[in-house]
Image: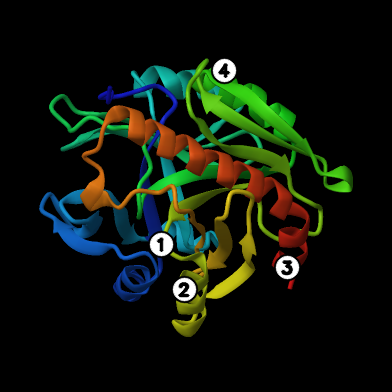
Amino acid sequence: MPEASPRGRFIWHELMTTDPDSAVPFYKKVVGWNVQSWEPDPTYRLWTMGDSPMGGLMPLPEHAQRMGTPPYWLPYVAVPDVDATVRQATSLGARTYVEPRDIPVGRFAVLADPQGATFALYKPAVGQPPTSDDAGLADFSWHELATTNWRAAWDFYHALFGWEKTEAMDMGAAGIYQMYRRGAGGPTLGGMYDKSAEMPAPPHWLCYVTVPSADKAATTVKRLGGRVIYGPADVPGGGRIAQCLDPQGAMFAVHATAAAPARSARKTTKANKTKASKRTKRTVKKATAKARVSAKKKRRR
């Protein structure tokens, strides 16, 4: 059953960019999202698919630009108490970028983990629609942490969100790719690994969104001025992935698999949705781990 505020679920995704107006047609053509204004704040817009909000879009704050922060996707993780989680996170070595504050749809805060990767906490307000782990087309379905010490990062996130380890892949000289899930028996959410010293990007979260065709999405990315830094590449199970930069420099990834249901057809039985979601997760977790070595080399270009 859907849960209103499940601890440890990636519940929202927000693009902070230097050119929101240019980002709209780019992601509309690459992913298929539409956009609509958000009445409480005219500078904030919502990515939508049909009647469903998929994420947010806003200008990268000027103070962040002055500090040299590039455009990026910010993942939000659900917690039952934002303030208590911020206190716990800071006691574990995190930094607070945005103190807990209320917005019309809930309460949130923005943090950096002890290695520097930025993420946000969110508790939806009472009455907000429940969320689900099922991932369909245009949904974010995999979350990957590139960091300087994945074991230390793991201890941090495990304490904060209760995540549990699942499979670990030995990538040889590239180290371990550790996958994780939301609680015992929950769905696999993503993976984490140590980035190479040559990788120019600081520790960061990479969010994957499901598309009908990774090849078409990658071609569109390049045609519209973005970059494909890895792929498109085959993955076990018949799917494909590509890791990309949008024209403003925000990093994101796409994956395509026949297991992902169209949003218009998502009112299926719970059993069918669960089966499709598990196939999708298995495909991506195998693919992203195998892509690490090649992807690191291409990011240095």
Sequence-earlier tag: 4 or 1: 4
Question: CA gap, disc 3 to disc 1?
Answer: 24 Å
Question: CA gap, disc 3 to disc 2?
Answer: 20 Å
Q: Amino acid at mark 1?
A: Pro
Sequence-earlier tag: 4 or 3: 4
Labels 1 & 2 near each other (Cβ < 8 A): yes
Within 10 angstroms of label 1, few (less than 14), some, or many (20 or more) residues? Answer: many
Q: Nearer the viewer, residue 267 or 72?
A: 267
Check the image and name the residue furthest to the left.
Answer: 39
The image shows residue 153 at horizontal and vertical percentages of: 66, 31
Q: Amino acid at mark 2?
A: Lys
Mark 4 sits on what residue? 159
Mark 3 sits on what residue? 298
- Residue 170 as seen in the image, left or right of residue 99: right
- Which SS class for mark 4? helix
The image shows residue 273 at horizontal and vertical percentages of: 34, 35
Sequence-earlier tag: 3 or 1: 1
